[in-house]
Amino acid sequence: MKFFSAKQIYAADKFTIEKQQISSIDLMERAAIQIFNWLHVRMQGAQVKIHLFCGIGNNGGDGLALARHLKEHGYNIEVNVVNYSDKRSKDFLINLDRLKERKVWPNFLERDGEFTVIGPDDIIIDAIFGIGLNRSPDPWVARLIGHLNSSGAFILSIDIPSGLYMDKAIEDVNAVIKANHVLSFQVPKLVFFLPETGVFSNQWEILDIGLDQEYLKDTETEFEVIGKSEVLPMYKPREKFSHKGTYGHSLIIGGSYGKIGAVTLSAKACLTSGSGLVTAYVPRCGYVPIQTALPEVMVITDKNETAIGAITFDIKPTVIGLGIGMGMASETGDALSEFLETNKLPLVIDADGLNLLAKHKSFLNKLPSKTILTPHPKELERLIGTWKDDFDMLKKAKVFSKKYDVILTIKGAHTMTIYNNHGYVNSTGNPGMATAGSGDALTGIITGLIAQGYEPLQAAIFGVYLHGMAGDLAIEHTGYQALTTSKLIDNIGMAFVDLFKMPEPPQEAEPQEKP
Ligand SMILES: NC(=O)C1=CN([C@@H]2O[C@H](COP(=O)(O)OP(=O)(O)OC[C@H]3O[C@@H](n4cnc5c(N)ncnc54)[C@H](OP(=O)(O)O)[C@@H]3O)[C@@H](O)[C@H]2O)[C@@H](O)CC1
Ligand SMILES: Nc1ncnc2c1ncn2[C@@H]1O[C@H](COP(=O)(O)OP(=O)(O)O)[C@@H](O)[C@H]1O
Ligand SMILES: [K+]
């Protein structure tokens, strides 16, 4: 699924209205009915107090239309119009009239007014600002938002938490609604996935309001979210008459005294993701542990006992995963420099491999085209420098990717793979994966996919998806806290199997409300 800009969503809106020969008020009604149905299924007429806070634009119009449906079904509502501007939208005004026709009189909140008391067991509908926010809310609106956030009530945001911009960072974290749940129209919003802004939309889901599918399909975007439907077409089935040579030979280079486990995890993940053969290249102290832990994996030892001092081998691998647990010894840096002079094989570089690149920036010019770098944010900072906010980080990451022709897989709750001008945002994974070695497993998986013939960009996107899915499947048995990387690796196989499982149909019956 793609991430559209606000401008593209307005264009899709306009296109849909023309193509389906409806008016914008009909589209607003569709949107409001979808939200009403969502609430009605869950609330079943319960008399919990619902406070609606509606701005004066179309987001506010959605809120007013929702208020009308709630009123008609006997809900206990109170409607507030947040009067932050005189420029009321046409469809807001139509819905205001429709509400008044039902004898519902909103409170008009102004600059110096008092705010209503909200109990912790009440519900707040946040329809103050939608995707049209283009400047900081006035201080009194920020104060209102703070009042709502501190009420303890459940906050349901319409389309986007009020105060979040679609395409830039927030200036004041206290002027953004902290939503418990967001019902967003048609398409996910990039800000739900970025670390600084994602915290405002704890949970979110998409409501289909029937925007024209063809238009959405044909519109190019810079970012997209990666789910099962995006990775399934990448999957390469196993051939009946294949052999282990068909699926490549991965070489995992890394390890140092005390960090041989990192290579063990990476090599195991590599093998488990389907690499035909896997060899680990480690300092001598790694020989016995790896041979003991992983009988399927071959081992080449360095001349040194505790840290890699030369990267030379006489096998012919398909791909190399490099850097895990490797340490930063100067002789290891020299070995890497020398190796990069002649290496032509595809590379996946992680951990200390990245730190060495950051320390010796000239190494970056020696990387083969489409080398995959898998930094976590701290490693990324060492490579690209500091950033002002998430949007600035994405911009800098794109510049870096273009400059060195590398693929950046930036790890986090929603790992983002950046190549050139495009970003691929992962949707699988969970906080249980914030555990030792989980990144080492990712390096192994991506390396293993390249060994099997996946193009580097596909290997990075697909590998991140599988890694997150393996984590999601693992926690069904372990819970978050007890998830270890070994258990994640044990679930890589089921992550492949899951690709072919159909999603369960929704359990609940929809109410009979029609647009
Ligand atoms: N497209 C779709 O698919 C559908 C969209 N729908 C809904 O429409 C919503 C977008 O509505 P919207 O364009 O009217 O903008 P909204 O967010 O309500 O803001 C209102 C106006 O406020 C202004 N303004 C901005 N910042 C400000 C500030 N700090 N302080 C004061 N004023 C400020 C700014 O106007 P300006 O003053 O800049 O001219 C802005 O236009 C969308 O989120 C969804 O809920 C559905 O109805 C149906 C289908
Ligand atoms: N909160 C989270 N939600 C989802 N995935 C996470 C979360 N925290 C960490 N991860 C994933 O776990 C991995 C951690 O990698 P990394 O920081 O390199 O750890 P390590 O060095 O221990 O291997 C990354 O793939 C990251 O995306
Ligand atoms: K909102």
Image: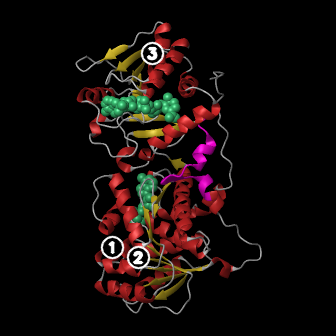
- Circle 2 Cα neighbour tier, 10 Å, few/some/many (<14 / 14–19 / ≥20): many
Q: Position of residue 77 (x, y in %)?
A: 44, 15
Q: Is residue 252 above or below residue 128?
A: below
* Residue at image coords 37%, 33%: 162
Q: Amino acid at mark 3?
A: Leu
Residue 96, numbered label: 3
Element class at badge 2: loop
N-terminal label among 2 and 1? 2
Q: How is the image coloured?
A: secondary structure
Q: Quadrant of ligand 1?
A: top left
- Circle 3 Cα neighbour tier, 10 Å, few/some/many (<14 / 14–19 / ≥20): many
Q: Amino acid at mark 1?
A: Asn
Q: Amino acid at mark 2?
A: Gly
* Residue at image coords 41%, 26%: 57
Residue occupied by mark 1: 355
* Residue at image coords 30%, 37%: 135
Residue occupied by mark 2: 323
Please give left or right for residue 209 compared with residue 145 in the image.
right
* Residue at image coords 49%, 50%: 479
- Residue 486 drawn in magenta: no
- Circle 1 Cα neighbour tier, 10 Å, few/some/many (<14 / 14–19 / ≥20): many
Q: CA distance from mark 2 to mark 3?
A: 62 Å
Is residue 401 visible from the viewing direction of this image? yes
Q: CA distance from mark 2 to mark 1?
A: 9 Å
Q: Position of residue 253 (x, y in %)?
A: 45, 80
**Marks 2, 3: nearer the viewer:** 3
Q: Position of residue 307 (x, y in %)?
A: 36, 84
Q: Which residues are magenta?
A: 209-231
Q: Which quarter of the figure is the C terminus placed in?
A: top right
Q: Is residue 165 above or below residue 252?
A: above
C-beta proximity under 8 Å, tags 2 and 1: yes
